[in-house]
Protein backbone atom coordinates (compact mmCIF):
# COMPACT_ATOMS: atom_id res chain seq x y z
CA UNK A 1 0.00 0.00 0.00
CA UNK A 2 1.54 3.30 -1.02
CA UNK A 3 0.51 6.86 -0.28
CA UNK A 4 -1.64 8.07 2.54
CA UNK A 5 -5.33 7.28 2.43
CA UNK A 6 -7.80 9.33 4.43
CA UNK A 7 -10.29 7.32 6.43
CA UNK A 8 -13.84 7.23 5.06
CA UNK A 9 -15.14 6.69 8.59
CA UNK A 10 -13.33 8.41 11.40
CA UNK A 11 -15.18 7.95 14.69
CA UNK A 12 -13.16 9.30 17.60
CA UNK A 13 -13.50 9.48 21.35
CA UNK A 14 -16.46 7.11 21.44
CA UNK A 15 -17.96 6.29 24.81
CA UNK A 16 -21.05 4.18 25.23
CA UNK A 17 -22.70 2.97 28.40
CA UNK A 18 -25.83 0.99 29.00
CA UNK A 19 -26.99 2.21 32.37
CA UNK A 20 -24.10 1.59 34.75
CA UNK A 21 -22.27 -0.64 32.27
CA UNK A 22 -19.57 1.30 30.45
CA UNK A 23 -19.05 -0.72 27.26
CA UNK A 24 -16.95 1.50 24.97
CA UNK A 25 -14.11 3.57 26.44
CA UNK A 26 -12.68 6.43 24.35
CA UNK A 27 -12.64 4.30 21.24
CA UNK A 28 -11.20 5.58 17.98
CA UNK A 29 -12.48 3.62 15.01
CA UNK A 30 -11.30 4.22 11.47
CA UNK A 31 -12.26 2.61 8.20
CA UNK A 32 -10.29 3.21 5.02
CA UNK A 33 -11.63 3.10 1.47
CA UNK A 34 -10.30 0.26 -0.64
CA UNK A 35 -9.17 -1.63 2.45
CA UNK A 36 -10.45 -4.44 4.61
CA UNK A 37 -10.21 -3.56 8.29
CA UNK A 38 -10.53 -6.61 10.51
CA UNK A 39 -12.29 -5.71 13.76
CA UNK A 40 -11.27 -8.30 16.31
CA UNK A 41 -11.71 -8.85 20.02
CA UNK A 42 -12.95 -11.46 22.43
CA UNK A 43 -16.62 -12.20 23.05
CA UNK A 44 -18.11 -9.17 24.73
CA UNK A 45 -15.21 -6.86 23.79
CA UNK A 46 -17.63 -4.41 22.20
CA UNK A 47 -17.37 -5.07 18.46
CA UNK A 48 -21.09 -5.28 17.79
CA UNK A 49 -21.85 -2.33 20.07
CA UNK A 50 -19.22 -0.26 18.24
CA UNK A 51 -20.74 -1.07 14.86
CA UNK A 52 -24.27 -0.44 16.09
CA UNK A 53 -23.17 2.87 17.58
CA UNK A 54 -21.50 3.82 14.30
CA UNK A 55 -24.71 3.25 12.32
CA UNK A 56 -26.94 4.92 14.88
CA UNK A 57 -28.75 1.91 16.30
CA UNK A 58 -27.26 3.10 19.58
CA UNK A 59 -26.39 6.72 20.30
CA UNK A 60 -22.88 7.31 21.58
CA UNK A 61 -22.58 9.13 24.90
CA UNK A 62 -19.67 11.00 23.35
CA UNK A 63 -17.70 10.86 20.16
CA UNK A 64 -17.19 12.67 16.85
CA UNK A 65 -18.03 10.95 13.60
CA UNK A 66 -16.52 12.14 10.34
CA UNK A 67 -17.60 10.57 7.09
CA UNK A 68 -15.51 11.34 4.02
CA UNK A 69 -13.88 14.08 6.04
CA UNK A 70 -17.13 15.82 6.98
CA UNK A 71 -18.66 15.82 10.45
CA UNK A 72 -21.94 13.92 10.39
CA UNK A 73 -24.58 12.97 12.88
CA UNK A 74 -26.16 9.59 12.30
CA UNK A 75 -29.45 9.29 14.14
CA UNK A 76 -30.35 5.84 12.88
CA UNK A 77 -29.74 3.15 10.28
CA UNK A 78 -31.59 5.18 7.64
CA UNK A 79 -29.09 8.02 7.99
CA UNK A 80 -26.26 5.49 7.77
CA UNK A 81 -27.77 3.92 4.65
CA UNK A 82 -28.24 7.35 3.08
CA UNK A 83 -24.49 7.94 3.52
CA UNK A 84 -23.75 4.53 2.00
CA UNK A 85 -22.94 2.58 5.16
CA UNK A 86 -24.39 -0.93 5.27
CA UNK A 87 -24.08 -3.68 7.86
CA UNK A 88 -24.55 -7.37 7.14
CA UNK A 89 -25.53 -8.84 10.49
CA UNK A 90 -24.69 -12.37 11.42
CA UNK A 91 -28.28 -13.54 11.43
CA UNK A 92 -28.46 -12.16 7.87
CA UNK A 93 -32.08 -11.05 8.10
CA UNK A 94 -33.05 -12.74 4.85
CA UNK A 95 -36.57 -14.05 4.38
CA UNK A 96 -36.61 -17.75 3.64
CA UNK A 97 -39.87 -17.69 1.80
CA UNK A 98 -38.80 -14.98 -0.64
CA UNK A 99 -36.56 -15.41 -3.66
CA UNK A 100 -33.17 -13.78 -4.18
CA UNK A 101 -34.47 -10.71 -6.02
CA UNK A 102 -37.25 -10.13 -3.49
CA UNK A 103 -34.75 -10.38 -0.66
CA UNK A 104 -32.27 -8.02 -2.25
CA UNK A 105 -34.96 -5.35 -2.72
CA UNK A 106 -36.93 -5.99 0.46
CA UNK A 107 -38.06 -2.65 1.85
CA UNK A 108 -36.53 -0.73 -1.08
CA UNK A 109 -38.54 -2.12 -3.95
CA UNK A 110 -38.20 -0.49 -7.34
CA UNK A 111 -41.57 0.64 -8.63
CA UNK A 112 -42.90 2.06 -11.86
CA UNK A 113 -46.24 3.85 -11.88
CA UNK A 114 -46.94 2.44 -8.43
CA UNK A 115 -46.30 -1.16 -9.47
CA UNK A 116 -43.31 -3.32 -8.63
CA UNK A 117 -40.85 -3.23 -11.47
CA UNK A 118 -39.75 -6.87 -11.43
CA UNK A 119 -37.81 -6.65 -14.67
CA UNK A 120 -35.72 -3.75 -13.43
CA UNK A 121 -35.09 -5.41 -10.06
CA UNK A 122 -34.08 -8.69 -11.74
CA UNK A 123 -31.70 -6.82 -14.00
CA UNK A 124 -30.14 -4.89 -11.10
CA UNK A 125 -29.81 -8.07 -9.03
CA UNK A 126 -28.17 -9.88 -11.93
CA UNK A 127 -25.76 -7.03 -12.66
CA UNK A 128 -24.81 -6.72 -9.00
CA UNK A 129 -24.16 -10.44 -8.58
CA UNK A 130 -22.14 -10.71 -11.76
CA UNK A 131 -20.27 -7.49 -10.94
CA UNK A 132 -19.21 -9.23 -7.74
CA UNK A 133 -18.28 -12.28 -9.78
CA UNK A 134 -20.92 -14.39 -8.07
CA UNK A 135 -21.87 -17.24 -10.35
CA UNK A 136 -22.80 -19.93 -7.88
CA UNK A 137 -26.54 -19.32 -7.69
CA UNK A 138 -28.53 -21.12 -10.35
CA UNK A 139 -31.45 -18.75 -10.58
CA UNK A 140 -32.07 -15.39 -8.98
CA UNK A 141 -35.71 -16.44 -8.76
CA UNK A 142 -34.99 -19.36 -6.43
CA UNK A 143 -36.17 -19.05 -2.87
CA UNK A 144 -33.52 -18.22 -0.30
CA UNK A 145 -34.49 -21.31 1.70
CA UNK A 146 -32.97 -23.42 -1.08
CA UNK A 147 -29.56 -21.75 -0.82
CA UNK A 148 -26.47 -22.99 1.00
CA UNK A 149 -25.07 -20.97 3.89
CA UNK A 150 -22.38 -19.52 1.68
CA UNK A 151 -24.85 -18.56 -1.02
CA UNK A 152 -27.07 -16.89 1.56
CA UNK A 153 -24.13 -14.90 2.85
CA UNK A 154 -23.33 -13.93 -0.74
CA UNK A 155 -26.87 -12.69 -1.33
CA UNK A 156 -26.79 -10.71 1.93
CA UNK A 157 -23.50 -9.09 0.91
CA UNK A 158 -24.73 -8.39 -2.63
CA UNK A 159 -27.82 -6.79 -1.11
CA UNK A 160 -25.63 -4.51 0.96
CA UNK A 161 -23.75 -3.21 -2.09
CA UNK A 162 -26.81 -2.71 -4.31
CA UNK A 163 -27.17 0.90 -3.28
CA UNK A 164 -23.77 2.25 -4.23
CA UNK A 165 -22.57 1.60 -0.73
CA UNK A 166 -19.28 3.05 0.34
CA UNK A 167 -18.77 1.11 3.54
CA UNK A 168 -19.85 -2.44 4.26
CA UNK A 169 -19.52 -4.05 7.68
CA UNK A 170 -19.60 -7.85 7.73
CA UNK A 171 -20.26 -9.34 11.17
CA UNK A 172 -18.73 -12.82 11.27
CA UNK A 173 -19.64 -13.68 7.67
CA UNK A 174 -17.87 -17.04 7.65
CA UNK A 175 -18.76 -18.27 11.15
CA UNK A 176 -21.17 -20.93 9.93
CA UNK A 177 -19.45 -21.82 6.66
CA UNK A 178 -17.38 -24.74 5.41
CA UNK A 179 -14.00 -24.42 3.74
CA UNK A 180 -15.08 -23.82 0.15
CA UNK A 181 -17.86 -21.43 1.07
CA UNK A 182 -15.55 -19.51 3.39
CA UNK A 183 -13.11 -19.09 0.51
CA UNK A 184 -15.89 -17.71 -1.68
CA UNK A 185 -17.06 -15.22 0.92
CA UNK A 186 -13.50 -14.09 1.63
CA UNK A 187 -12.89 -13.61 -2.09
CA UNK A 188 -16.04 -11.53 -2.24
CA UNK A 189 -14.87 -9.50 0.78
CA UNK A 190 -11.61 -8.77 -1.03
CA UNK A 191 -13.46 -7.78 -4.20
CA UNK A 192 -15.53 -5.21 -2.32
CA UNK A 193 -12.33 -3.54 -1.17
CA UNK A 194 -10.88 -3.74 -4.68
CA UNK A 195 -13.95 -1.88 -5.89
CA UNK A 196 -12.99 0.91 -3.50
CA UNK A 197 -15.36 0.23 -0.61
CA UNK A 198 -14.28 0.50 2.98
CA UNK A 199 -14.84 -2.99 4.36
CA UNK A 200 -15.00 -3.97 8.02
CA UNK A 201 -14.69 -7.65 8.74
CA UNK A 202 -15.62 -8.71 12.26
CA UNK A 203 -14.02 -12.07 12.83
CA UNK A 204 -12.70 -14.46 15.43
CA UNK A 205 -10.92 -16.45 12.76
CA UNK A 206 -7.23 -15.62 12.36
CA UNK A 207 -7.03 -17.41 9.02
CA UNK A 208 -9.75 -15.16 7.65
CA UNK A 209 -8.17 -12.06 9.15
CA UNK A 210 -4.74 -12.78 7.72
CA UNK A 211 -6.13 -13.83 4.38
CA UNK A 212 -8.08 -10.67 3.56
CA UNK A 213 -7.36 -7.84 5.97
CA UNK A 214 -5.20 -4.82 5.23
CA UNK A 215 -5.48 -3.56 8.80
CA UNK A 216 -6.47 -5.01 12.12
CA UNK A 217 -8.28 -3.10 14.85
CA UNK A 218 -8.50 -4.85 18.20
CA UNK A 219 -10.96 -4.14 20.97
CA UNK A 220 -10.14 -5.34 24.45
CA UNK A 221 -12.71 -4.79 27.21
CA UNK A 222 -14.20 -1.94 25.24
CA UNK A 223 -10.90 -0.20 24.45
CA UNK A 224 -9.23 -0.01 21.07
CA UNK A 225 -5.85 -1.45 21.96
CA UNK A 226 -4.42 -1.62 18.45
CA UNK A 227 -5.14 -0.32 14.99
CA UNK A 228 -2.29 -1.36 12.76
CA UNK A 229 -1.50 -2.51 9.24
CA UNK A 230 -1.72 -6.29 9.11
CA UNK A 231 1.87 -6.36 7.86
CA UNK A 232 3.05 -5.10 11.26
CA UNK A 233 1.63 -7.97 13.28
CA UNK A 234 1.65 -11.75 13.23
CA UNK A 235 -1.04 -14.15 14.33
CA UNK A 236 0.41 -14.71 17.75
CA UNK A 237 0.51 -10.97 18.41
CA UNK A 238 -3.11 -10.55 17.34
CA UNK A 239 -4.15 -13.42 19.59
CA UNK A 240 -2.24 -11.81 22.46
CA UNK A 241 -3.89 -8.45 21.80
CA UNK A 242 -7.30 -10.12 21.80
CA UNK A 243 -6.71 -12.09 24.99
CA UNK A 244 -4.57 -9.69 27.05
CA UNK A 245 -4.91 -6.30 25.38
CA UNK A 246 -1.19 -6.14 24.82
CA UNK A 247 1.58 -7.67 22.72
CA UNK A 248 5.13 -6.41 22.98
CA UNK A 249 5.04 -2.66 22.46
CA UNK A 250 1.56 -2.71 20.93
CA UNK A 251 -1.58 -2.29 22.99
CA UNK A 252 -2.21 -1.25 26.53
CA UNK A 253 0.83 -0.11 28.46
CA UNK A 254 -0.41 -1.19 31.85
CA UNK A 255 -3.27 -3.03 33.46
CA UNK A 256 -6.53 -4.21 32.02
CA UNK A 257 -8.40 -1.87 34.32
CA UNK A 258 -7.55 0.67 31.70
CA UNK A 259 -5.24 3.02 33.49
CA UNK A 260 -2.62 2.46 30.88
CA UNK A 261 -1.90 4.49 27.83
CA UNK A 262 -2.59 2.98 24.48
CA UNK A 263 -0.09 3.09 21.67
CA UNK A 264 -2.12 3.82 18.59
CA UNK A 265 0.60 2.98 16.15
CA UNK A 266 0.27 2.80 12.47
CA UNK A 267 -1.58 5.66 10.90
CA UNK A 268 -3.02 5.25 7.46
CA UNK A 269 -0.77 3.51 4.98
N1 LIG B 1 -28.19 -3.54 24.74
C1 LIG B 1 -27.28 -3.78 25.69
N2 LIG B 1 -27.50 -3.49 26.97
C2 LIG B 1 -26.57 -3.71 27.92
N3 LIG B 1 -25.36 -4.25 27.69
C3 LIG B 1 -25.08 -4.57 26.43
C4 LIG B 1 -26.00 -4.36 25.36
N4 LIG B 1 -25.43 -4.78 24.20
C5 LIG B 1 -24.21 -5.22 24.54
N5 LIG B 1 -23.99 -5.09 25.86
C6 LIG B 1 -22.76 -5.46 26.58
O1 LIG B 1 -21.70 -4.81 25.92
C7 LIG B 1 -20.54 -5.65 25.90
C8 LIG B 1 -20.05 -5.77 24.47
O2 LIG B 1 -20.98 -6.54 23.72
P1 LIG B 1 -20.83 -6.80 22.17
O3 LIG B 1 -22.07 -7.46 21.72
O4 LIG B 1 -20.43 -5.55 21.49
O5 LIG B 1 -19.61 -7.83 22.12
P2 LIG B 1 -18.88 -8.41 20.85
O6 LIG B 1 -17.47 -7.91 20.86
O7 LIG B 1 -19.68 -8.17 19.64
O8 LIG B 1 -18.84 -9.98 21.22
P3 LIG B 1 -19.12 -11.28 20.31
O9 LIG B 1 -17.80 -11.62 19.70
O10 LIG B 1 -19.52 -12.30 21.33
O11 LIG B 1 -20.19 -10.98 19.33
C9 LIG B 1 -20.95 -6.96 26.53
O12 LIG B 1 -20.51 -6.96 27.85
C10 LIG B 1 -22.46 -6.92 26.48
O13 LIG B 1 -23.01 -7.63 27.54
MG1 LIG C 1 -20.81 -9.36 18.36
Image (cartoon, rainbow, N blue to C red):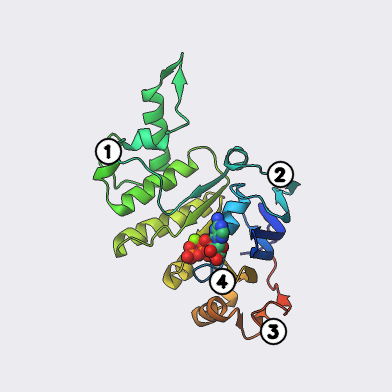
What is the CA distance from the residue labelled 2 to the residue labelled 1? 38 Å
Q: Which residue is mark 1?
A: 143
Which of pointers 3 and 4 indicates the residue nearer the eye? Answer: 3
Q: Residues within 10 Å of mark 4 (few under 14, many from 20)?
A: many
Q: In the image as oriented, which residue stretches furthest toward the front?
A: 20
Q: Which residue is mark 3?
A: 254
For the N terminus, the quadrant is: bottom right
Q: Which residue is mark 4?
A: 230
The picture places residue 180, in percent across and down from the top left corner, at 30, 61
Can see residue 106? Answer: yes
Q: Which of 24 and 156 lies nearest the eye of the viewer?
A: 24
What is the CA distance from the residue labelled 3 to the residue labelled 4? 23 Å
Q: Residues within 10 Å of mark 1 (few under 14, many from 20)?
A: some
Asked which secondary structure carries label 4, the reply is helix
Q: Earlier in the sequence, mark 4 or mark 1?
A: 1
Label 2, ligand 1: CB separation under 8 Å: no
Q: Which residue is mark 2?
A: 73
Quadrant housing residue 34: bottom right
Q: Earlier in the sequence, mark 3 or mark 1?
A: 1
Amino acid sequence: MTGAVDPIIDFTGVNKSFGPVHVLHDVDFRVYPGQVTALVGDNGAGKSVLVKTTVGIYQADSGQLHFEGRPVHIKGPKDAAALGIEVVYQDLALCDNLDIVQNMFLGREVTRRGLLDDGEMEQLARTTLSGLNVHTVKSIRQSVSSLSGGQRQTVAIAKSVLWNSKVVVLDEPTAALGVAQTAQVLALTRRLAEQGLGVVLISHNMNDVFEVADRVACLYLGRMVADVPISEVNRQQVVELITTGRSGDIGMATDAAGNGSIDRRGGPT
